[in-house]
Image: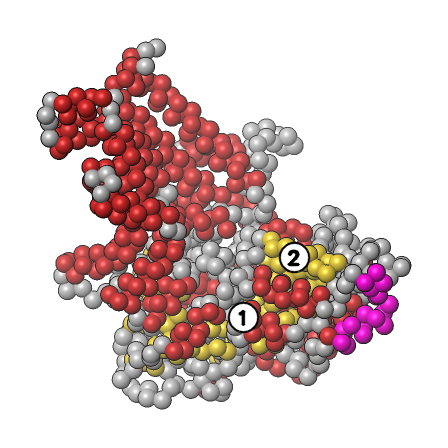
Amino acid sequence: MSGRGGYLLRKIGWALVTIAVVVIFNFVLFRVLPGDPAKSGLRDPRLNPAAVEALRERFGTDRPLFVDLEGGNLLDSQFTAYLGALSRADLGTSYAFRDQPVSDLIGQAVVNTLWLVLPSQALAILLGSALGLFAAWRRGRPLDVAALTFSLFMWSLPTFFLGIILLVAGANWFGLPTAGRITIAGDFASSWDVIWDVGRHLLLPTLTLTLVLLGEYMLIMRSSVLDVLGEDYILTARAKGLSTYRIIRDHALRNAMLPMVTLIALNLGFTVSGAIQVEAVYSWPGLGALTVDAVGDRDYPVLQGAFLLIALAVVVANLAAELIYGWLDPRVSEG
Amino acid sequence: MRRLDSALVPMATLVLILAACGTTQGTPDQSVDGGSPAEGAGTAAGGTVRIGVGGYPDSLNPGNGVLSEAYAIYELVYDTPVSVTSAGDYVPELASDWSVSEDGLSWTMTIVSGATFHDGEPLTAEDVAFSIELYRDTEDFPFLASYGAPFETIEATDETTVTLTTAEPLNTFESYMAFIYVLPQHIWEAEDDAVAFENADMVGSGPFMLAEASQGEFVQLDAYADHWATPPSVDGVIFQTYGNADARVTALTTGEVDAITEFPATAVSALQNAENVNVHIADIAAGGSLRDVFFNITTEEDCPPDGGVCSGHPALKDVAVRQALATAVDKQQIIDVATLGTGSPGLSLVPPGLGEFYASEIGDYAFDVDAANAILDEAGYEDSDGDGVRECLPDQDCETLTFRFHYADDIDTAPREAELLQGMWSEIGVTTEIQGLDPDTLTSICCPTFDYDIMLWGWGSDPDPAFLLGVALCTEIESGFSETGYCNPDYDALYDAQSVEQDPATRVEMIHEMQQILMDDLPYIIPYYQQSIQAWRTDTFTGWLDGDPTLGLEDPSSLTVIRPTE
């Protein structure tokens, strides 16, 4: 198969295979860990064997993992139950929050995460590429050196550390809130007050995340623009007497965007998993925080659901990147 | 209540400290220990109290709760028949009185009249009986099922009377009733599967009622002005989750919250110097947690046939070695260095917060390196090759006094404590190989496998000492509740006797005697009892109970009496 249609089908096919592998891997991965979800966190003599048995039965962890060799039905296993539920888009009920469906828990967490991560990503992409472009343009000049130093510094700074510093400084000097998305039971006179309050809550976590992400975008943008500026066709453009501005806008930018598209797509894929460290510092109830807790609790259903969602997001983002590649650089899809 | 400690564990860790049942009765007992409302408390009312906490309730359904954050909410939203004071006494709450028949098998409780649920329905003996029965019959309620378990029949004989019968005499009736959160029958009877019931409206009869809850974020409670006994003076309380301890501390100093219930010991001095902030360090009432060092002393005869490895170091089975190890431990140094002074010296498995059950009179092994060395010399453990490590006795199946030493890596002070102990023991010619492990792995090598030498871990206590003293029973070796494989029939006999003893004073004596036996036989060394570290702002609300031991700021006994600062 060749041509555009074939390219598209091939890519989608691979995406589906990846997801299938993830579905199986998800099941196996968490069950390899030592520990029993029915007992996790419950080491107590009064948790009598009957209670543990009842919980195992409720969780389904009393059944064999893959095939039931002793019972009458070979297929009565945890794995088939998992696949069956998944095919009905049922992610099950959390083990740790025994009365909460996984889809509810994850749904709410993802919304919270996107609230935080999307603005940060957008800001980081805009500011980072602009900074990278200017730095490349002014290569070797003070602006370039300053921007490069700043970006490298931010990129290498531990997120957690930057978060704490900004939190303490922001709270003590500017009275900014240190946790949450909005003042709970706040006394709001108008919807402007609400927006103002939400903005104040968003400021520090967004700033932290933007600063952390920005460096990478800046560095990639700078180096790829520099690469392109060294090409023969740029020399030709220059020989034609075009201004530097026009050379960059019309000739360099589109080609320099290729590595950026990869980076943006990859990062957008991971936005769903959230910024675990930023969420932890600012007590942001997102997917990252939920996943970390679920690991500690041996909460298989939440972990399976969260990892499936994260994997889906990454696969879809990658697929999107491949498709945009084909559009940006037709050679990719023709080959 | 489970094997872990409370204040310093990370957010993700499940912690259950059924620290104390609330004293919604508002009895004078509360102020016995100096916990009287602070000066300046007037008649002001209103205001919403904001409390920064480390976690979020794992369920609004009391049967499902595991975390201490969940139990803090249950205490406020529900009433219980009996409650515990900071002095460790059981006092009436929904049950105005209770009595037991001659044979000790039949209990009668009188339920107050005039109590109402938050939806306006009256609370009657029917609701109490229904709740006990529900807990008993719902096996997969991880903890509360056991609080209904002893009762064979449960019956509301009229509007205000509940009668219960048990198969065996029950001397700790009150400790069971202290955890029966009374649920409205008219709501719960419609639920076929009590475990799957989310209980999102949380209708109870307690002094506070649920206004809003957001998963992982906050729980907002409003005052229940019509509470039959102790309507709060404040308008409401918000528990907001601050997963990060530094954020929690900062939020208190900037006034974002009015109180925080746990924070690292490293923040204590900063908060003590902060303006308008009061730091309160005290023993934990009616419970509390302790750090323990314990030894694998399982004998071959006692080794559990099903999966028991029992690879404990032979020398540790010699009580002289354990005595030497105990004598070489400088408990105060561990408290000062590892906990920065936020602990009190440990003694037995019964913490001081348990009141009269705490056997303060038994003597501990006073820290003395020379004495410890002398014990080992006398017992024949010599360092003949001069390498600094003593050798085993000829009849022991081991080379030197070199022990595996594991600690629980989710306790953030444990690595430091293990190193300190290693240093102390090296002074008496004992070498330890330290390894931190996560609790699940620790459990898998601990018990009933018994594949270790020495462990450093922790326990949270129940208001009744019988719970923790159960870890040293011969009969618990196979179940894995015993962590040491310790077995002393005299101890077991005393345990059985105290569990049916009807005279409280005699029972206290027996409990003390058991602690003395454990001190002599030394399956455990208790380096320290953890204290509760809490802090509140003095410029927003006043009247927080600041006695010692303390029930905690989030306890109804504090939250129903505080008022706005004038």
Residue found 64% across the figure and 30% down from its top: A69
Q: Is residue B371 magenta?
A: yes
Between B285 and B62, the residue placed more toward the observer is B285
Q: Is residue B227 left or right of residue B72?
A: left
Please report, as a chain letter, where disc 1 is located. B
Is disc 2 in the same subunit as disc 1? yes
Left or right of B406? Residue B323 is right
Tell me the subunit letter for badge 2: B
Q: Secondary structure at mark 2?
A: strand
Indicate which disc residue B434 carries.
2
Residue B107 showing in the rendered view: no
For the image shown, how many numbered marks are present on the structure?
2
Q: CA distance from mark 2 to mark 1?
A: 19 Å
Quarter of the figure with the C terminus of chain A: top left
Judge from the rendering whether residue B194 lies leftward or rightward of residue B396; answer left or right.
left
Q: Are marks 2 and 1 in contact (CB under 8 Å)?
A: no
Q: Where on the picture, by quarter, is residue B117? A: bottom left
- Asked if residue A185 lies in the magenta stretch, the reply is no
What is the magenta range?
A: B370-386
Q: Is residue B154 above or below residue B351?
A: above
Q: Quadrant of residue B183?
A: bottom left
- Pointer 2: residues within 10 angstroms few (<14), some, or many (20+)? some
Query: Quick check: can you spot residue B348?
Result: yes
- The N terminus of chain A appears in which quarter of the rendering? top left
Question: Where's residue B133, x and y in %?
Answer: 52, 61
Percent position of residue B87, x then y: 53, 81
Image point 49% across, 31% down: which residue? A24
In the rendering, which numbered label is found on residue A151? none
Query: Residue B339, which numbered label?
Result: 1
Q: Is residue A176 above or below residue B341?
A: above
Q: Earlier in the sequence, mark 2 or mark 1?
A: 1
